[in-house]
Image (cartoon, grey):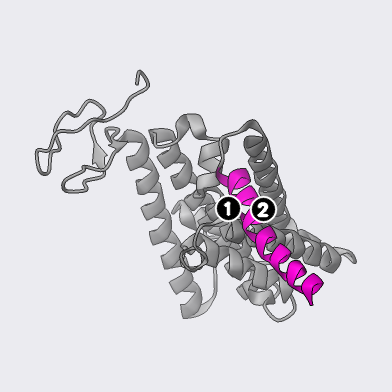
Amino acid sequence: MSGGGEGEEGRRRRLPRLRARLHELYYGHSRRSVHFRLGVIAVDLVLIAFFVAAPFLRQTPAFLAVDYFVAFVLAVDLVARALAWPDLKSWFRRPIVLVDLFVLATLLAPQWLFNLAFLRALRIWTLFHSDIFWRTVGRRYDDTRWEDAARAVSTLVTFVFVATGFVYTSFAGRHPGIEGYVDALYFTVATLTTTGFGDVTLPGTWGKVISIVIMISGITLFVRLAQTLIRPYKVRFACPVCGLLRHDPDAVHCKACGAVLNIPNEDG
């Protein structure tokens, strides 16, 4: 009984130590933590490359084995991130986490969720919108115009691959203009940019609705990207009184409430 009690007590002590160690690796500032996060980001990039190439690899004999291995890697990463987060309930409510969990579901059940596999491209969005990426690779550009531009580009690229996957899943092999993934990508880019060559079109009312959605979304995302690059840059600094988040870099007073600001800069 005593040995069993000590074993139970040991397990209870190991979990907090494990969570503390993972928290340091994912959110710490030491060299070991930075190297660990660089490794995690490298794995993320490999996973994204697999998701993008999946339509070309689906018919290969080893595809299913690779798919389940990717699911295992993603599951380990999600469990580690969950343990590193201070509060599990708040972690599960984060949009980025919900997207990653859905991507994991498509990997674990590729046969049943085949028609939704194109949503794995959302992993591009989650990577470039994650705190880990900007505190590690992009730490020099964190909270700058370049971060906003990179997020806007990642959203645009994600939309291109999601829309391409949807068109490919819905029309490939059933419509003469969409014979493969490249045809779906060509149609998406031509429609997104409103080029409108007309050599590849989608049939019926449903096809027209999809084309309209892609065109409107493309214009919106391009305008968003242009605004990010052209509009006057404002730093992110929450006003201690009214909470206004964006201010001019040299602002002394909040434009909304007039409160005195103390915005830090590169000089201190």
Local crowd at mark 2 within 10 Å, few (<14), some, or many (≥20)? Answer: some
Note whether residue 183 is visible: no
- Farthest bottom residue in view: 112
Is 262 or 162 nearer to us in this picture?
262
Task: Return the x and y of residue 105 as percentages of the image width and height.
Answer: 66, 73
Residue 124's label in the rendered image is 1
Q: Secondary structure at mark 2?
A: helix
Of the pair 141 and 52, the residue shown nearer to us: 141
Residue drawn at (32%, 34%) of the image: 230
Question: Left or right of 24: which side holds 233?
Answer: left
Residue at 30% x, 33% y: name it.
233
Question: Where 189 sits versus 35, above or below?
Answer: below
What residue span does the magenta drawing correspond to?
A: 1-27
Question: In the rendered image, which residue does mark 2 sit on?
Answer: 48
Residue 48 screen position, x and y as percent:
67, 53
| Residue sitting at x 26%, y 41% | 246
Q: CA distance from mark 1 to mark 2?
A: 7 Å
Give the x, y percent position of residue 238.
Answer: 26, 43
Q: 225 above or below 17? A: above
- Quarter of the image that includes the C terminus: top left
Foreground of the two, 18 or 196: 18
Give the overall secondary structure of the magenta segment. Answer: helix
Question: Which three-letter amino acid code belongs to the residue tagged 1?
Answer: Ile
Say which quarter of the image contains residue 256.
top left
Question: Is residue 178 visible to us here?
Answer: yes
